[in-house]
Image (cartoon, helix red, strand yellow):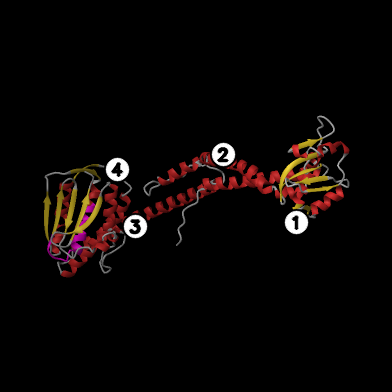
Amino acid sequence: MNLRRPRSLKWSLVLRIAILQCVMLTLIIVVIIGAMLATGLIPHDYEDGTMDVLADAVTRDANGALVLKENSDLTKLRSEVPDLWFIIRDKQGHRLREGTVPVAYQPFVGLLDNISDARIDLAIGEAAPPGGKIRWTDTAAGNVQIMCGTKGGLSLLRVLGQAPELFLQGILPLAGLMALATLFVTPWVVRGALSSLGRAATAAGQIDIDKRGVQLPLDGVPKEVTPLVDAVNAALSRLDAGYARHKRFLTDAAHELRTPVAILNTRLAALPATPERARLLQDAARLSTLADQLLDLQRLDRQAEHFGPVDLVLLARNVVVDLAPMAFAAGYEMAFEPAKETLVVRGDRTAIERAVTNLVQNAIDHGGKAGRITISVITPAVIEVLDEGDGVPTSERERIFEPFYRLHPQDHGAGLGLNLVRDLMQLHGGQIEVLDGKAGGACFRMIFPA
């Protein structure tokens, strides 16, 4: 089974929103540029169209002279600007010239050595592109000076060629700022939107088998998550109804068993004392114990606020007195070893007495029919039941407390006694341990809160 860590909704939203912002920002810029190209807004104001084409086309021949490499942009420029003129020169004195320089701009030809960058126009303060431009620029032929007109338009391919630079210098920084804002804002927004789910999760964590009618709160839960919460609440309701039916069945079955078992015991007691009568009485006692254990399952719902003071010494002594005849008949000796005259804890007296009884009966059933069964009450608040049988293997010391589990399948018990002891100890905030006995066998230790 492949168990993967759950994905974070918060960071999934942050990542997706950041990516969406980058994509949308890029699309917006592309659409704006495309619209400007389609409507002619960019070519109307763009003044470097001719110079861009010439800079891309200029190169050198085998002798180092400046030449123009014919390409689609240059061909298109020649067709769109019949009176194309330009002068291209380098610092070594090479010069490339075509067309006739307008008369008004000819005085600048003799001053090219003294001009690095210029916009030439006949009108002062004219908003439209100038009639000519002079600029030093880097080309395939090296750094050259170009003087030309400005009638060429903006090339779409040149715009697309500038897209990576535009992305790195324009879109990427802006997208980064938006992503940082998203990184800080989105977790706060998601945390606020899902705060109600935190309350529902807290309520779910408090669900316990002893609590009925628990429902997860729906206040403030986003409508997208409401069906899930409703489904969980419906499942909790079904579990409550099923548990109630289970409890009623166990209670009714236990009460129905007690009457025929009592009648059976009465009739068996009237029989002559024979070995067969003794075995029948033992079997009837097991039936009576089973009925009592089923009723004890229902008593586990009793809450701690109903607890009262319980003297463990007195309680254990009463169990020894009640079960001593059964132990003697099974071939055991019994010993009672209290560390003090009284040792009081808070709890349910009947439940604790039933737990100790179950442990002593378990020792009688599994102690090997010989040796001694010892019940000890020691400080601060511990009851121990020891036998001298075969003990409990270490690998089985957890499983024997599972309901209906029997260490030896041929045993006559129902496998509920030790399970009840564990549940009763948990109800009292204590625990039950299985250890090796001092003289072999098993030692069951009931540890109560001091």
Which residue matches tag 4?
304
Element carrying mark 1: loop
Q: Can residue 264 be seen in this view?
A: no
Q: What stretch is highlighted in magenta?
A: 354-372
Q: What residue type is labelled 2?
A: Ala
Label whose residue precedes the other's in the sequence (1 or 4): 1
Give amino acid for label 3.
Answer: Ala
| Crowd rating for badge 4 (residues with CA inside 10 Å; few <14, some 14–19, many 20+) | few
CA separation in Å, label 2 and label 3: 66 Å
Q: Nearer the N terminus, badge 4 or badge 2?
A: 2
Eye-nearest disc, 4 or 3: 4
Dot 3: element = helix
Tag 1: amino acid = Asn
Can you identify the residue that label 3 sits on? 253
Q: For marks 2 and 1, give the CA distance.
A: 58 Å
Query: The residue under label 4 is which amino acid type?
Result: Ala
Pointers 1 and 3 in contact (C-beta within 8 Å): no
Q: In this view, does 450 lie to the left or right of 190?
A: left
Q: Name the residue under label 2.
A: 181
Q: x, y percentage for residue 165?
A: 66, 46
- Circle 2 or circle 3, nearest the eye: 2
